[in-house]
């Protein structure tokens, strides 16, 4: 950290948050970290739109789309906890830097093959597998970076800025990607051969190329960041503490989280949502956009962007009303999830872009309202030595389990309609929230900054 970095004021709560944000923006390390993260997250949104659209244009088969998503998610799910253990043992910056170079190569190769018209389905499978493996290590290292760069007192303000910018990219990226594909790619490109080769998809190729460029630039900005090597952000490698074998380290972290009743309850509840709700969302929305002639790539991008915009607005509202709760953090989560389920049920019946965008805007607003506080609650509750494993477990739930669920959904959609899938997923979310309210202590979870006992 910069030795001239000003400390947050302690004279009153009224100016604490603005002063913290101002101090952060004066911090050279934070500026480099956050600017690189913004570029990388913006690039990720281009791939998020381009990859499913590429597969649907090559094959039109939801089962193939589910398979590609599985090839991204399975290695991510299998290795993300090991990635978290490596982050705790070594340096999140070192791990993150390696993943940026790997992703740069993979996405540049994917872009080149698409633009050359030489991409076939087996190549998509192989590159998807590589991207999934790389993200298994980039996710825990990226989410664990912040406590290694800013002081503990600035963590919530830093998370607020980071997550706010992430939501901004989730609004801008899909819009730009959808527009790019609609303008430069042919929205209904047919396979050039029985193997699924693409004849022409310039917009899709450019989307992958821009993501590759974002990794190149963000790798340079990350190289400029100096991490904290003492105090709360220290790693075992930095302090000289003995390290454990990776698998043993993962097991130790899981045991610690299981013994913490509130963490265990939240992680299990979020796992159920990822398995039964998030998967259908990942695959059903692109299929919805591609299956209706009045929609298309631009509509897909707009609907996804509306969700990002809603989440960003929710974070702004959360910052303006930081203590607004329906009794407790846990109860608020359950009520909001139930409402989200009700809003999700009619998604399969939309016939215009504005209808899907309006529903996803409100869904994002409700989800974004609690996101910063939940993220910070986990970071404050978990001992520093376990932070990488905690964040890898959290991200494993939403970025490992959900795409696996999406792969299963691709198979299920052979037997059910889109309307039935959306209605069933929304109803299931309402049921999960109701069961958690009655049968679990989740409703009593508070976001008071209580740190669990240190672990070994």
Image (spheres, grey):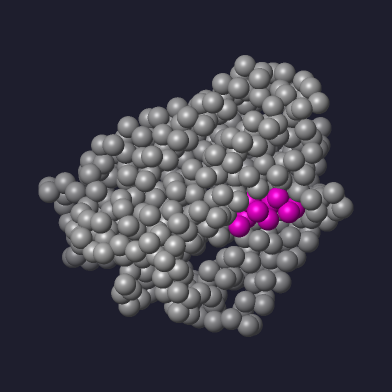
Residue, far left: 3
- Residues shaded magenta: 401-409
Say if 303 sits above or below 178 in the image.
Answer: below
The location of residue 70, given as percent across then percent down, is: 65, 48
For image coordinates 56% across by 34% down, the residue present is 46
Say if 119 sits above or below 370 in the image.
Answer: above
In reply to whether residue 94 is colored magenta, the answer given is: no
Say if 43 sits above or below 113 in the image.
Answer: below
Q: Could you tell me how many numbered marks the image carries?
A: 0
Quadrant in the rendering for residue 14:
bottom left
**Quadrant housing the C terminus:** bottom left
In reply to whether residue 402 is colored magenta, the answer given is: yes
Residue, far right: 415
Does residue 142 show up?
yes
Does residue 279 show up?
no
Q: Is residue 42 left or right of residue 4?
A: right
Quadrant in the rendering for residue 59:
top right
The location of residue 159, given as percent across then percent down, is: 37, 54
Q: Is residue 415 left or right of residue 402?
A: right
Residue, far top: 116
For image coordinates 55% across by 39% down, the residue present is 130
The location of residue 8, given as percent across then percent down, is: 21, 58
């Amino acid at each position: 950290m910069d030795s001239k970095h000003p400390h947050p004021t302690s004279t009153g709560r009224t100016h604490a948050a603005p002063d913290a944000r101002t101090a952060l923006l004066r911090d050279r390390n934070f500026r480099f970290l956050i600017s690189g993260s913004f570029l990388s997250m913006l690039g990720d949104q281009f791939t998020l739109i381009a990859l499913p659209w590429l597969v649907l244009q090559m094959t039109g088969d939801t089962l193939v789309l589910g398979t590609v998503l599985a090839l991204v998610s399975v290695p991510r799910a299998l290795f993300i906890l090991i990635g978290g253990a490596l982050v705790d043992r070594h340096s999140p910056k070192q791990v993150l830097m390696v993943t940026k170079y790997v992703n740069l190569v993979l996405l540049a190769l994917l872009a080149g093959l698409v633009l050359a018209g030489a991409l076939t389905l087996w190549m998509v499978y192989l590159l998807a597998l590589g991207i999934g493996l790389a993200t298994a290590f980039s996710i825990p290292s990226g989410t664990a970076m912040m406590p290694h760069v800013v002081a503990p007192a600035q963590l919530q303000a830093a998370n607020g800025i980071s997550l706010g910018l992430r939501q901004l990219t989730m609004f801008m990226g899909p819009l730009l990607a959808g527009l790019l594909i609609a303008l430069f790619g042919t929205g209904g490109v047919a396979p050039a051969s029985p193997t699924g080769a693409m004849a022409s998809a310039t917009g899709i190729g450019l989307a992958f190329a821009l993501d590759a460029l974002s990794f190149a630039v963000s790798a340079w900005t990350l190289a400029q960041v100096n991490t904290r090597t003492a105090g709360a952000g220290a790693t075992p490698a930095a302090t000289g503490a003995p390290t454990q074998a990776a698998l043993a380290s993962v097991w130790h972290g899981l045991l610690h989280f299981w013994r913490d009743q509130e963490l265990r309850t939240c992680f299990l509840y979020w796992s159920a949502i990822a398995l039964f709700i998030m998967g259908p969302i990942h695959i059903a929305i692109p299929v919805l956009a591609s299956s209706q002639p009045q929609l298309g790539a631009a509509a897909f991008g707009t609907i996804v962007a509306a969700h990002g915009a809603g989440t960003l607005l929710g974070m702004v509202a959360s910052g303006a009303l930081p203590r607004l709760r329906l009794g407790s953090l846990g109860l608020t989560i359950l009520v909001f999830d139930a409402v989200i389920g009700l809003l999700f049920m009619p998604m399969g019946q939309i016939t215009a872009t504005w209808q899907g965008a309006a529903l996803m805007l409100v869904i994002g607003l409700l989800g974004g309202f609690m996101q910063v506080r939940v993220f910070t609650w986990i970071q404050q509750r978990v001992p520093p030595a376990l932070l990488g494993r905690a964040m890898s477990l959290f991200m494993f739930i939403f970025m490992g389990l959900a795409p696996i669920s999406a792969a299963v959904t691709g198979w299920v959609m052979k037997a059910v309609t889109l309307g039935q899938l959306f209605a069933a997923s929304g109803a299931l979310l309402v049921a999960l929230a109701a069961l958690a309210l009655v049968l679990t202590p989740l409703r009593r979870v508070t976001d008071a900054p209580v740190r669990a006992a240190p672990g070994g």
